[in-house]
Amino acid sequence: MNFAVLQFPASNCDQDAVHAIRHLGHSARLLWHKESSLGDADCVIVPGGFSYGDYLRCGAIARFSPVMQAVKQFADNGGLVLGICNGFQVLTEAGLLPGALIRNRDLQFHCEFIFLKTATAASPFTNQIPSGKLLRLPIAHGEGCYFADEETLAKLKANNQILWQYCDANGNLTDSANPNGALLNIAGICNEKRNVAGLMPHPERACEPLLGSDDGKWIFESIFAALKNKAVAAAAA
Amino acid sequence: MKAKIIITPKKAVVDPQGITVRKALEHMGYSGVTGVHIGKYIEIDLAPGTDRDAAHKAINDAARKLLSNPVIEDYKLEIE
């Protein structure tokens, strides 16, 4: 499978994402923000960092880059897109995902491991995560508090769009396990069509035991499986 | 000629900066402060002789698309 990892000025998790995907046995390349074509990409990763210096709002400027116009079209055609951390912020600013990410409730930058509960296996981003498995992943953000109005939250719940929630080591969705004040402990969501997802934690930084956790691989393995199914379906059609 | 845009967090959005500053004001003894809301102020210089209505329309459009995020922010626009 071919992954395109976007690269904006001040992206800083782009190389990690490429490394993780290659480590897991697939092909990944960096794609500069001025490119207007995604080439033969099967999946797009919008990586973490501080695109355009986080000026104005996190992700606000990146959404207007030429490459994001191509990503929008790719997503409209059903292509898989995963935004990680700043990438999640870019996708909400671009309107590809609902809601917004605002300042952490304690105004502090959080750099730590957290636990994630996967709310549904029914998505290209969660289908391989073993049932009941809590993911231990690092977070590193100052503006990761998920916000959406009540109507949007109700829709997210009704459509099963909440993919991951912050929890404690026993899987309880407690307030103390919520590092940033996100509504409903939301760490990651997908769109209604389920082909675009974003999350604040960093799976690409946790794909090898040497890094303290390899739980992040389950998210990538889910994408690989979804892409494989898609390819099989396309060949059969 | 200038466009002035004041951007504030929507009331439903938790504003931890505003809350922290309100608490600091209380701590300093400023009584009667019931809320603090921290936003942004943006000033845009416009070429002299720009048509006022056209500028208002264009900046309003920009404020919705880029300068503010309608999910979490409100804005006020003035041309002067």
Image (tube, coloured by chain):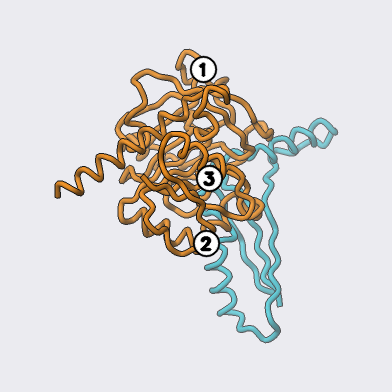
Chain colours: A orange, B cyan
Determine the CA span between mark 1 and mark 3. Answer: 26 Å
> What chain letter is assigned to the residue under label 1?
A
Mark with earlier residue (2, 3): 3
Mark nearer the N terminus (1 vs 3): 3
Numbered label attached to residue B58: none
| Residue placed furthest toward the top | A170
Residue shown at 53% from the left, 27% from the top: A137
The residue wearing badge 2 is: A64
Q: Position of residue A211 (x, y in %)?
A: 57, 26
Q: Quadrant of the N terminus of chain A?
A: top left
**Dot 1: what SS?**
loop
Please indicate whether residue B51 sits to the left or right of residue B80 in the image: left
Query: What whole-number distance in Å separates the C-alpha atoms at marks 2 and 3?
Result: 16 Å
Helix, strand, or loop for circle 3? loop
Q: Are marks 2 and 3 on the same chain?
A: yes
Q: Nearer the viewer, mark 2 or mark 3?
A: 3
Residue at the spot x=64%, y=51% of the render? A10
In the rendered image of this protein, does residue A206 appear above or below residue A146?
above
Tell me the residue at 58%/58% (across/down).
A61
Q: Which element is circle 2 on?
A: helix
- Identify the residue under disc 1: A168
Q: Residues within 10 Å of mark 1 (few under 14, many from 20)?
A: some
Percent across and percent down for residue A194 are 33, 42
Depth check, front residue: A157 or A30:
A30
Q: Amino acid at mark 2?
A: Phe
Q: Chain of mark 3?
A: A
Write down the residue under mark 3: A47
Q: Nearer the viewer, residue B78 or A33?
A: A33
Q: Nearer the viewer, residue A143 or A130?
A: A130
Q: Quadrant of residue A126?
A: top left
Can residue A92 be seen in this snapshot? no
Amino acid tagged 3: Pro
